[in-house]
Image (cartoon, rainbow, N blue to C red):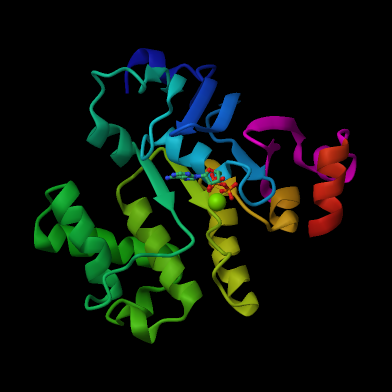
Amino acid sequence: MTSDEAKTDVPAIELVDICKSFGVVEVLKGVSATVARGETVCLIGASGSGKSTLLRCVNLLSPPTSGTIRLHGQTITDPKVDLNAVRSRTGMVFQHFNLFQHKSAVDNIALALRRVRRMSREEARERALQQLDKVGLRALASARPSHLSGGQQQRVAIARSLAMEPDIMLFDEATSALDPELVKGVLDVMRDLATASGMTMMVVTHEMNFAREVADRVLFVDSGVIAEEGPARQLLTDPRTPRLKSFLSQVL
Ligand code: ADP
Ligand code: MG
C-alpha cells in the first residue's frame, strides 16, 4: 500500500460517468458513485436494470465503454493497468458458485491459492482451512460440492474468494439461487464480513432486510442510471422517486 492509499479519505471505489454498451444497446448510461473504505453498499433494482453489468465493470470483468474507475486511488481503466493484479484485489461472488465438482472444499480453495498466489501445497492447504473455519465449514473440508448444500457451497465460494485477501468484495445475487432455508447462513457470513471484518463491499441483492440492516448506503439502479441513493433505512422506508416506490412495493 502506498502512502496515497493509506489516506482514509481516498474512496475504495470511485466510478466516474461509467457507460457500457453491448453493440448498439446502451446498458449503463453514466453512472457515478463512490464507496468509502470499509463501507457496504447495496445495489437494488429491477431485473435488467444493469446491476450485474455495473458490478462486472468494477473488477473489469467487463470493462466500461467509457468512464473512469479508481480503486483506492488507482485508475484501473487506464489501458496500462495490470488486469490480473486488479482482479486479485477484488473478490467476486456470483449467484452460481462455480466450484470444481471433483475436488473437495479445501482443495477448491487451495487450488486457487497455488495457482494465483503460487503457494506451496502445505501453505495453501493451511490457508484454505483457516478460510473454511471463518465461514463455519472446517468440519466439511474434505467434502465434495455434491455432498454440500447450496448454502454451504456458496460459503466455500466466499471462502475461496477471501483466501486471496481482496480488499474489495463484490457480491452478485449470492443468495438468489438458494432454497429459502439456506439463505440465512450465507447472509450471516456476508454480514460478518461487512461488520466484524470491515470489508469494503458492493452487494447486488433482493434481500431488502439485509440491505436495511447491513448496508451503509443503498443505490437504486434503474434503466442504467442510479436513480436514487441514500442511507439504507431512509431510502427503503422513505423513497423519493415514483420508480423506487413502485419497485419497493413489488419486492417488500
Ligand atoms: P441486472 O443484473 O440488473 O438484472 P444486467 O446488468 O444483467 O441487469 O443486464 C442489463 C441489460 O444488459 C439487460 O438488458 C441485458 O440483456 C444486457 N446485457 C447484459 N450483458 C450483456 C451482454 N454480454 N451482451 C448483451 N447484452 C447484455
Ligand atoms: Mg444481475
Q: Quadrant of residue 168?
A: top left
Q: Residue furthest top?
A: 4
Vertical arrangement, residue 70 with respect to residue 139, above or below: above
Q: Quadrant of the C terminus?
A: bottom right
Q: Nearer the viewer, residue 97 or 166?
A: 97
Residue occupying the point 65% across, 30% down: 225
Residue occupying the point 52% across, 59% down: 174
Residue 35 visible in rendering:
no
Q: Quadrant of residue 35?
A: top right
Residue 223 visible in rendering:
yes
Q: Is residue 249 left or right of residue 145?
A: right
Q: Position of residue 44 (x, y in %)?
A: 68, 46
Q: Is residue 235 left or right of residue 125?
A: right
Residue 224 magenta-highlighted: yes
Q: Position of residue 79 (x, y in %)?
A: 27, 19
Q: Residue furthest bottom?
A: 147
Q: How many marks?
A: 0
Residue occupying the point 75% across, 57% down: 209
Q: Nearer the viewer, residue 245 or 120?
A: 245
- Residue range in magenta is 214-241
Q: Position of residue 171 (x, y in %)?
A: 51, 50
Residue 123 magenta-highlighted: no
